[in-house]
Amino acid sequence: MSPMIPTGFKSFDEKTGGLEPKKSYLLIGSKESGKEEFSYKLLESAASNNFSSVYVTTAKSATDLVNDFLARKINVSKFLGDKIIILDDFSRNVSPQAVGNPYTKILNGPVDLTGLSVTLSGVDNDFIKEGNMVVNILDSISVLLLYNNPVTLFRFLQFISGRAKISGITMFFLLDDKIHPQDVNETIKSICDGVISLKLENGKRYFTLTGVAKEVLEWTELQ
C-alpha cells in the first residue's frame, strides 16, 4: 500500500492521516484563504517524506517563488533539482529571453497548454524511472483560466489528471473560487477526486476535505 502524503499541518494530518496518493485534489478558496501556504508546506512535507514533486508556477517567476519559500521559512532548498523541479510558466510573459537552471524549466506561458503538458509529463517520467512517488502542484488554475477558453482548459485538466492517475501520480490544482462563475468552479471540482476547501475567518484559517475516504465535513482550524 502506498504511503499517505502528510501536508505538514498537524490538525489536517491528525484528522485525515494525510492525503491519499494517486488521486487528484482541488485546493480551493479565496486569495486570503491560505492556498499558497498550504501548497508550500505540502511541497516541503512531501519532499521530506521521500516524494518527488513538480511545482508549476503561473503567477510568479521561479526566482520569486524560491524567495517566497525562504521568506515563509519553507525549507526546500536542499531538495531543489533533486526531489523538486519547478516549471516556470510565468517568466516568458515578462522576459522572453528567460532561461532555466538545474531546478527550473522555463515554459512558453499559460496559453501553451500543450507545452506545459509535454514538459510536465517528461519530468514526471524521469522521477518515475528513478522509482519515486510523484506529487504535482499546479498553481494556479485561476491564472490559466485568464488565458484559455474554459472548455479547452477543462479538457486539459481531464487529460493530465487521467494521465497522472494511470502513472500513479498525485495532482493538486489551486483555484480561487471568488473570481470565477460558480459553474466553472463546479466543473473543475467534478474533474478531481478530492476537494480541500480553505477559508479565512476572524484571523484564523479553516479547512474541509470531501470526496475521499476520510472526509472532514465540519470547518476545522488549520494548524
Image (cartoon, rainbow, N blue to C red):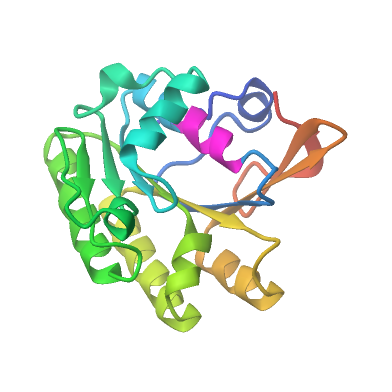
The mark total stands at 0
Who is closer to the viewer here, 29 or 124?
29
Q: Where is residue 208? Give x, y as percent.
A: 72, 44
Residue found 21% across the figure and 57% down from its top:
96
- x%, y% of residue 199? 75, 44
Q: Does the magenta stretch include residue 57?
A: no
Pick whichever, 139 or 51, lies toward us: 139
Q: In which quarter of the image is residue 189?
A: bottom right
Residue visible at 32% across and 55% down? 94
Image height of 127 relative to 143, above or below: above
Q: Residue at x 44, y 51 (%)?
A: 59
Residue 202 located left or right of residue 18: right
Q: Where is residue 128 in the image (x, y as percent from the top left)?
A: 18, 42
For the record, the magenta segment spans: 35-42
| Residue 194 in view, yes or no | yes
Q: Residue furthest right?
A: 202
Indicate yes or no whether the magenta region holds residue 36: yes
Write down the quadrant of residue 1 in the picture: top left
Name the residue: 49% across, 17% down: 73
